[in-house]
Amino acid sequence: MALDNIGKDLLLLSDFIEINKAYGSDDKKLIKRAELNTLALSFRKGLYDQLRYLDLDGNEVIRINYNNGIPTIVPKNQLQNKQDRYYFQDSLKLKDGEIYISILDLNIEHGKIEQPYKPMIRLVTPIFDEYGEKRGVVILNYLAEYLIDGLKLFSLEQKNHHMLINSDNYFLIYDKRPELEFAFMFGENKDKKYSAIYPKTYKCFKNRQQGQYSIGSGILTFDSVFSYPENLKSDKYVSIINQDTCWRLITFVPSVPLWSLSEMKGNELLIVISLLIFSVIISLLIAQLQLKKIMNNNEINKLAHHDGLTGLINRGYFNKLFHWKMQSARKDNTKLALIYIDLDAFKDLNDNFGHSAGDLALKAIAKNLHNVFSDNAYVARLGGDEFAILIYDLTTHQTVIEQVEKFIKNNNEPLILEDISYHLSTSIGIAFFPEHGGCINEVMHNADAAMYDIKHSGKNGFKIFEL
């Protein structure tokens, strides 16, 4: 389904708000920065009718309208309050890492169904500040006409009936009777449900995921189409919360005279065999394209979250993981350790041996870090010669100290650069959550302060932050 990548975009949008701290509505510069990032996402994707950030009172703080290919930031005086909309009320119950998926319905603006009709699915996830307090929600309005157009490809044969019904048995697509589509938006209309119009065939698939039945006048085929991204369902950081768990794609094919291969002439049989071979070739090509798409998506995801030189987690993704783990630590009453590492005299190395040697040194440090901090830890390159490690599910401080001492010992082995032995030392600061800060910024600041203390007092060592 086209929904497969939307969850990633939703989490990216939440990153824009959280990293830029746009929930501080009194800071216009931060909101503007988040607006521009959101505008760029709308330009690049071209799938979303609206991208929005709402505060806890339902007020739109940021809104980007797609405007048929010309994304625009909606002025403040045109922003709306969505407090009474069902998807906002449902989203207030979300916890960190949960994604809510609305039903597929028609878009409403200023209390009225928008004309012409816009079928819409909304994906929502909550926003938290650095103290773990919920500050609002971000919403992607996915323009579902793309999804519907894809499903309508099944309707090429004019004699067949093609239908898509939601979990309440209302028609979302019905090629033969379009007047029945989205009837639930215009009152109760229970008489326009599939179960009311076709009660006999409804009994065939009422309690089944998929199947096929001969009903006298033709063949009824049905299958289940899930309304959430399957790749998100398996993500350990994400929990899917939705109302419309499953749709039914139904095809009815009227009875037609059957062909018999024995009655075919030579040319007709050759044509049938050729079509079968052609369909197999097309299926193989489609499978190859799908595999290439999966590989490309994995590569894009890696590039978005990892440093290109060392392969370690980058700053943006590290902050996101830090946020998730801090939420878990608060809930489970566990501790975190943040380790800040800065290379000593790295500029001298670059000046004396060149940037290629500097890159080799950074890769060597990254490998050493990854080997030492492999369990219950995220290792990141923050930029330049700065690295960070977040250790979670921590039981004792001594565990952290032992790992840091092992890293320093390993790192004291000299590097061989252009046949010359070079010793590259490190200065390390350590801070613990919750002892040394109640939010991400405080813990990071204190670990950074401890690192600078050791750098100014002799280098090549570590220090735990002291209150």
Image (tube, rainbow, N blue to C red):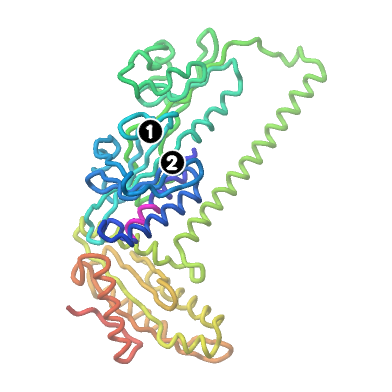
Main SS, magenta region, reads helix
Q: Between residues 84 and 153, which one lies in front from this camera angle?
A: 84
Residue 285 shows in the view: yes
Q: Which mark is residue 240?
A: none
The residue range painted magenta reads 12-19
Callout 1 touching callout 2 (CB < 8 Å)? yes
Residue 211 shows in the view: no
Residue 17 magenta-highlighted: yes
The crowd level at tag 2 (other Cα within 10 Å; few <14, some 14-19, many 20+) is many
Above or below: residue 189 compared with residue 278: above
The crowd level at tag 1 (other Cα within 10 Å; few <14, some 14-19, many 20+) is many
Q: In the image, residue 325 lies at what x, y percent?
A: 29, 60
Which amino acid type is shown beneath numbered disc 1? Asn
Residue depicted at x 46% and y 42%: 67
Q: Quadrant of residue 319?
A: bottom left
Q: Quadrant of residue 48?
A: top left
Q: In the image, residue 71 lies at what x, y percent?
A: 46, 47
Q: Quadrant of residue 99?
A: top left
Quadrant for the C terminus in the image: bottom left
Q: How many marks?
A: 2
In this rendering, would 192 be left or right of 90?
right
Q: Which mark is residue 49?
A: 2
Residue 271 magenta-highlighted: no
